[in-house]
Amino acid sequence: MAQSGDRDALALMSGFEGDFLLSVLNASPDCVKLVEPDGTLSFMTENGMCAMEIDTFDMVAGRQWFDLWPDQMRTTLQDAMTRARNGERVSLEAECPTAKGTLKWWHITVLPISGPDGVVHKLLAASRDITERVLREREQLAYAKALEQELAEKSELLMQRDFLMREIDHRVKNSLSQVASILRLQARRSSDTVRAALDEAARRVASIARVHEQLQSSTDFKSIPAVPLLQRLCDEFTLSYDRQIPFCATTVDDLPMLSERASALCIIVSELVANGVRHGIGLDQVSVHLHQTDTRAEIRVINTASGPLARSDHAGSGLGTLICETYAATLSGSLDWHYDAGKMTTTLDFSPAA
């Protein structure tokens, strides 16, 4: 039932309804058509004929509307008209070429037009050209699929790279272990002085191999958490030196570091622990402590000692000290030795971040 506002509009348009309706239909950029209940076309707007590339309405007048569509769409359109005749508003999207063969996509709305008696006398079918939107969506979908394919290919390459990197790491570690074994064999056949030097070289090579093995736990080959790395390293030391090498850490997190910086840190700790074992008393433990403060961190290696080392035994004289100081420089760090109450404490102050 028309509301009062609608009735007022109809009263104002009395005598001009037809012209007004025609003006409204022709003002629409859509392809607006009137379809008889039996499906034949009885009207099409000028803009509609332009959109469908139809020169004159005589070309399609009286034809079944669905005959203008591809065969695969006819059943769908017949169903839409049936639903509209039953008073339903129907919307769908489909592809249909124009009269001159230009492929376009359309958003179609089919509405029933009822008379005063409530009976549906005509159907209004409006088709809006959505080709640009559909093509844009297809381009976006194609782009997304291309990115997905590229990502899959890169993921496969990364998996292959990770496999090769782990294989290389494994072989390097084995090679270093073999070098350490050869040095030990040579040491057994050498004089006492040479034997000591070869044993020390074998220990250092084995330490680097051990560090290399521990670094394989890195998931991205770029960074590694230093806390669990040092814990595993100290567990290895406990087995290697047959004495307790406890490790404790006070940090806000697992102290992630770039792999090369973590490697330098582990080599320094290996040297300091070996030095603590060498100069410690008996089988007393050598402990390793890690403490983090803001942007800096500190490693302390503590061992029992009968007294402070002579200057010639640490600060810049031995190869081990030279190795430690060289790697400490790469960590923006410094080394310090302090003896107190039967304990020798070697401290490395360093920056975990590059």
Image (cartoon, rainbow, N blue to C red):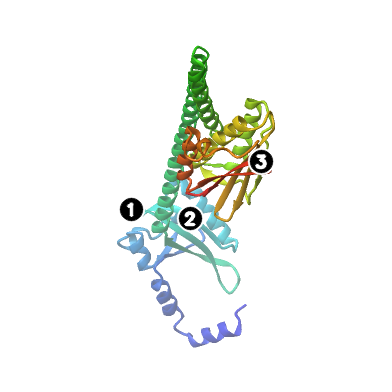
Q: Amino acid at mark 1?
A: Thr
Query: In the image, is 287 to the left or to the right of 72?
Result: right
- Looking at the picture, how far across and down is residue 162, in whole percent? 49, 33
Is residue 67 in view? no
Q: Which residue is mark 3?
A: 343
Q: Secondary structure at mark 2?
A: strand
Name the residue furthest top.
189
Q: Mark 3 and 1 residues: CB-CB less than 8 Å, in contact? A: no
Query: In the image, is 282 to the left or to the right of 321?
Result: right
Of mark 3 and mark 1, the one earlier in the sequence is 1
Instruction: Residue 118: give its label.
Output: none
Instruction: Residue 102: give its label.
Output: 1
Q: Which residue is mark 2?
A: 93
Q: Secondary structure at mark 1?
A: loop
Mark pair 2, 1: CA separation: 17 Å
Q: Amino acid at mark 3?
A: Lys
Quadrant that contains the N terminus? bottom right
Of mark 2 and mark 1, the one earlier in the sequence is 2
- Looking at the picture, how far across and down is residue 320, in whole percent? 50, 34
